[in-house]
Amino acid sequence: MRQLTDTHAHTVASTHAYSTIEEYFRAAADKGLQLFSITDHGPEMPDSPHPWHFGNMRVLPRVRYGVAMLRGVEANILPTEIRPLDVNETLMSFMDFGIASFHEPVFPPSDQKAHTRAMIAAMETGLVQILGHPGNPNFPININEVVRAARDNNVLIEINNSSFVSSRLGSEPYCIEILETVQTLDWKVAVSSDSHVHYAVGDVDIALEKIDRLGFPEDKIVTLNARRLIEFLGEHGKPVAQDLSVWLDDLDALEIIEL
């Protein structure tokens, strides 16, 4: 099994990351990816870019070196029911998609009930399409309730490769339980690198290995290829589905020729 997209990566706009968009484009092309995404942190993260950064992503090319790029944001889940996320409809109108994640500097860890309620509230806003690294052991959740809410709101559950490698240590048993619950409830996942340097873009092999061991069905991995991911965003009414329609057709034609 090989994945040809990546839905989670950070640039120098999030100052704890180290690469530019051009470096990501080149690395993605070198690795044979079809598509990658830039998802710098939302406004409440201490080192996040100014909100104008997200609105101005429209100046960036859709395709370079044959690789497409999605314009995204990793929004922060907030500890308030009045405002579940640190992004709003105006900011998200410029985005191809959003990820909703817990981050300790923004949401001090609390208890399972509070985490579960906040995560579900974030998905119910309709502003995000992926739930980011939900296996973080610092934020225990009711996995069954969260996966059901994700399915009800057509939000993908992220399986984050970095959670098995270097970030959020101790995540693995929770990620496995999440995968098992997703499979039981017949839902879908997004597999991502959470790259903070361009060398790691598309590096999801460890996550895919864990998925394969569980016998998780490939057709439930929405990020496996560009068409599957773009069609999913089309279900959310995202204009990127139309923007990249010709590119997808050309990609399909090229694959047929190569075969």
Image (cartoon, rainbow, N blue to C red):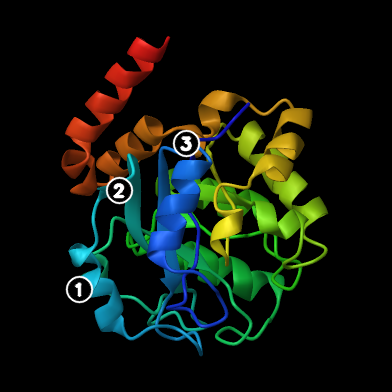
Instruction: Estimate how packed mark 3 is, as few (under 14), some (14 to 19) or many (20 or more) residues with alpha carbons within 10 Å.
Output: many
Q: How far is the residue under mark 2 from the one under mark 3?
A: 23 Å
Q: Amino acid at mark 2?
A: Arg
Compared with 166, 46 (above or below) is below
Compared with 21, 33 (above or below) is above
Closer to the chain start, of discs 1 and 2, is: 2
Camera-nearest residue between 180 and 163:
163
Is disc 3 placed on a helix, strand or loop? helix
Is residue 189 at all visible to an observer of this figure? Answer: yes
Q: Amino acid at mark 3?
A: Val
Residue 132 occupies which quadrant of the picture?
bottom right
Is disc 2 placed on a helix, strand or loop? strand
What residue is disc 3 on? 222
Closer to the chain start, of discs 2 and 3, is: 2
Q: How far is the residue under mark 1 from the one under mark 3?
A: 26 Å
Q: Badges 2 and 3: C-beta atoms under 8 Å apart? A: no
**Residue 2 point in image, percent of width and height:** 59, 30
Is disc 1 placed on a helix, strand or loop? helix
Closer to the chain start, of discs 1 and 3, is: 1
User: Residue at the location (72% across, 25% down)?
Assistant: 215
Residue 154 occupies which quadrant of the picture?
top left
Quadrant of image for the C terminus: top left
Compared with 43, 88 (above or below) is above
| Residue 129 disc label | none
- Is 80 on the left-hand or right-hand side of 209? left
Q: Amino acid at mark 1?
A: Thr
What residue is disc 2 on? 64
